Amino acid sequence: MEKSVRIFAPATIANLSCGFDVLGCCLDTVGDEMVITLTDKYGVSISKIEGADLPKSPEKNVAGVAVNALLKYLGKNVGVDIEIYKKIKAGSGIGSSAASSAGAVWAVNYLLGNPLKNVELIPFAMEGERLASGNAHADNVAPSLLGGFTLVRSYDPLDVIALHSPDQLYATVIHPQIEIKTADSRSVIKQNVPLDKAITQWGNLGGLVAGLYSENYELIGRSLKDVIIEPLRSILIPAFDNVKENALKAGALGCGISGSGPSIFALSKGYDTA
Ligand code: ADP
C-alpha cells in the first residue's frame, strides 16, 4: 500500500450567480498542492505550510479538522501528516479553505484504499468549511471533490449531483487584491427573499442547469443572473459593475461574484474569448 501521495487540490467557483450555496464548478488549472503521508505516529499533524500564513494546529486548520472527522467516522487509528503548498489565497473567494479540506480527505481516503466514494467524502470536507466560515456549506468542496459542475440539491439530507460540463466552457477569474471574509460577506445578505425575486432566481437556476446539459451557451448566458445576492454583495467589491460590463462587452456569456468574493468570474464559450 502507498504511504504518501502528492495531490493537486483544485480551486472552485461557488454560487455561479443564480445558485447561491448550491452551485459550484471546479477550475482545472488553479489550485494548491498537498503531500499527505500515513505515519506510525497516531494523530494528525501539519508539518509544513508554504505560500500562506495559516495555522499548523490540526484543530485550527481546515485540512486537520476534515481529516479528523473522516478518521473518526472510519474508526481508523492511523497517523496522518499533511504538507500544504498554498497557491490559492485564503479569503479570495475561489475556495481556498475548500481545496485544503477536500484535498486532505481525498488523499487520506486514497491512501486507505478508497473505503469511501468521492461523493461520500463531502460531509467530512464540509467540517473544514464549518471551521473556516461557521457554516458547513458544500458548494466549494463538492466541485473540488467531484470535478466539473455540481449542484447541492438538498442539505438535509445531503444530496449532491454532478452536472454535465460543456467542453467549450472556460472560466476567467480576476482577483482584486482586497480580502473579504466569508463571514463578513454573509452578514450583508438579507434572510428573506421577496417572491418575485425568488421566481426570477429559480427560473435562472433551472435555465443554467438545462443550458449545461444541452450545451446551449446562449441559454447559459441568459441564466447567469443573480437578482438576490449580487446587488448586496457587489457593493463590497470596488468597480464590480465596471468589470462586469466590460466582460460582457468582450463576449463573456455571464459574469458575477465568485463565492463570497472579492474574486469576479466570467464564463465564456471558447478559450480565446475567455
Ligand atoms: P475562501 O472562500 O477563499 O476559502 P474563507 O474566508 O472562506 O476563504 O476561508 C478562509 C479562512 O479559513 C481563513 O480565516 C483561514 O485562516 C482559514 N483556514 C484554516 N485553514 C485553512 C487552509 N488550510 N486553507 C485556507 N484557509 C484556511
Image: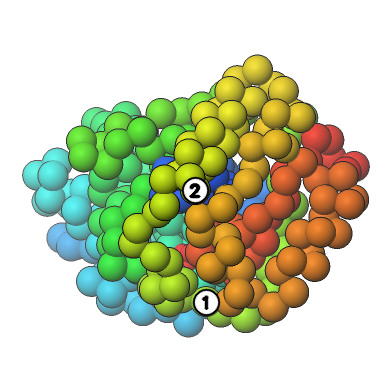
What colour scheme has been applied to the protein in the rendered image? rainbow
Coordinates of residue 10 in the picture (x, y in percent): 55, 50
Q: Which image quarter has ligand 1? A: bottom left
Q: Is mark 1 within 8 Å of ligand 1?
A: yes
Residue depicted at x 64% and y 42%: 224
Coordinates of residue 196 in the picture (x, y in percent): 48, 45
Q: Is residue 95 left or right of residue 253?
A: left
Q: Which residue is mark 2?
A: 197
Q: Which residue is mark 1?
A: 180
Tell me the distance, in whole angstroms, between the alpha carbons under discs 1 and 2.
25 Å
Considering depth in this image, is 51 or 25 the residue closer to the camera? 25
Coordinates of residue 198 in the picture (x, y in percent): 45, 44
Is residue 242 something that shows in the picture? yes
Name the image quarter holding residue 265.
bottom right
Q: Is residue 141 left or right of residue 213?
A: left
Task: State the SS at label 2.
Answer: helix
Name the image quarter holding residue 242.
bottom right
- Residue 28 image label: none
Coordinates of residue 189 in the picture (x, y in percent): 42, 66
- Which mark is nearer the camera, 1 or 2? 2
For label 2, count other residues whose C-alpha is less than 10 Å away and answer few (under 14), some (14-19) or many (20+).
few
Q: Quadrant of the N terminus?
A: top left
Q: Earlier in the sequence, mark 1 or mark 2?
A: 1
Q: Residue furthest top?
A: 214
